[in-house]
Image (tube, rainbow, N blue to C red):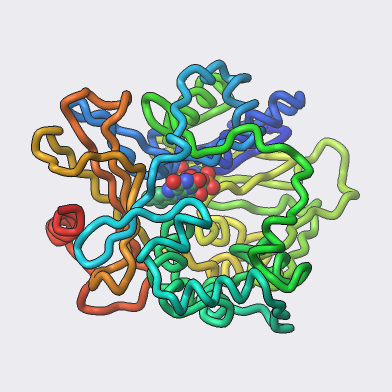
Amino acid sequence: MTLQVPALIVGAGISGLVCAYALRKAGVDALVIEASGRAGGALHSHRRDGYLLELGPQSFSGTAPLLALCSDLGIAREIVQAPRRVPRFVLMAGALKQVPLSPPAFFTSDLVSARTKWAIARDIFGKSTPPEQDESVADFARRKFSAELLDRLVAPFVSGVYAGDPERLSLRSAFPMLHEAEKRKGSVVRGMMAKPREVPRQSPTLLSFHEGTESLARALSIRLAEGLRLNVDVTCIRSTGTAVYAATRSAFGGVNSARPEPSRDAGSAPFQATIQMGGKQETILADNLVIATPADAGGKLLCGLHASFASLLGAIEYASVAVVSLGYRRSEVGHPLTGFGFLAPRSAGRTPAWGFLESGNRLRQCCLACLCFVSAAWPADNRRPRGSRERVEYVESASR
Ligand SMILES: Cc1cc2nc3c(=O)[nH]c(=O)nc-3n(C[C@H](O)[C@H](O)[C@H](O)COP(=O)(O)OP(=O)(O)OC[C@H]3O[C@@H](n4cnc5c(N)ncnc54)[C@H](O)[C@@H]3O)c2cc1C
């Protein structure tokens, strides 16, 4: 049997689900196809023995569109916000040190040396010009401030956001506002402070849900109902011969656009997807196609349309991250747990990692969950924990 749909979305991670929901609200009958048995992709929240374990993202940035989506889906009351002013920590010399949250606290803290503080003062009162060519986040931090600031704050923060290596991350792609600030004002600090706030931020902090980040995917799946099909693997996308595709390489090696030629025979659909479902093979015809899979998987699906998709999309690197969740009874932990999370810099003698400590209302009062991400995006060295047991031991020793 061949089904024809106005829009076919491949992948029911958060990208595919939100896209389908927006299209359906706009009156387009979108169908989402998901290879696995659950929707949500990387969003995966799991309850075990009273602990809430996040196997993927821990929180979202509370943007206005996200809050509006939650209201629309009727899950606004399930939102849990990260406390705004509670301290974050950095692991230094075996102890958790509080990250200063205000300029006076920064200049009086012993987190960085007087040399680094002087470099920051020089930025505030001096003037500098960014180089013509883009630079890495690490080069930027060393040029403007110091190697120490890079190691103790910038690199762990970058690991926390991108799980990536600051030596290889482009400043202009990852943190364009820092580059713009220096370009505009000759000072990163002055430029950031003078940044126009066109839209007031409606939510100042990170958020999740009482039952974890997957709640968002579950709510979207319920609304999509028949518009979502699980356990269906899209194996190949072909052109029906009525469309021509153009792929262009962007500055960062990704594909900028893939567009069908506008003129085609009435009644035909430009995309033909082969699907595998319970051992059976079927075909779906689609007027519009959205690929919401990881880039390399999308590249393979699309190579029947244009030879360059597989190599262009396959060349996009993903940082690998191990998630380690540990659960403790509150009485087993000596720390007052007054903070939100910690970062571990390389100089702490360990693989970069960051973690969240949580004891609040999402868990049984007697329990504490400690979630740690261990980034594998860094150059291989002997300190990187490899097996599961080793990762758990590493995280346990880091959190002592
Ligand atoms: C450990 C971890 C922690 C993270 N922490 C955060 C965080 O704290 N905050 C934050 O904002 N972001 C975080 N992220 C990033 C965020 O989770 C992802 O960017 C986001 O979930 C990606 O969603 P997606 O829909 O684009 O892709 P995915 O979630 O990867 O979904 C793609 C889907 O496509 C399906 N698929 C693949 N091939 C096919 C096929 N041939 N046919 C049908 N279906 C197919 C897959 O099964 C999958 O379900 C984290 C990511 C990870 C892995």
* Pick the front one: 200 or 286: 200
Image location of residue 336, percent across then percent down: 22, 39
In which quadrant will I find the N terminus? top right
Image location of residue 42, percent across then percent down: 42, 44
- Compared to residue 307, the image places residue 56 above or below, namely above
* Pick the front one: 374 or 14: 374
Q: Residue furthest right?
A: 263
Report whether 317 appears left or right of 245. left
In the picture, residue 56 is in which quadrant? top left
In the picture, residue 225 is in which quadrant? top right
* Pick the front one: 94 or 356: 94
* Residue 31 is at least partly visible in this image: yes
- Compared to residue 308, the image places residue 104 above or below, namely above
- Compared to residue 71, the image places residue 295 above or below, namely below
Q: Residue at point 68% right, 44% down?
A: 289
Image location of residue 79, percent across then percent down: 47, 25
* Residue 308 is at least partly visible in this image: no
Q: Residue at point 35% right, 65% down?
A: 110
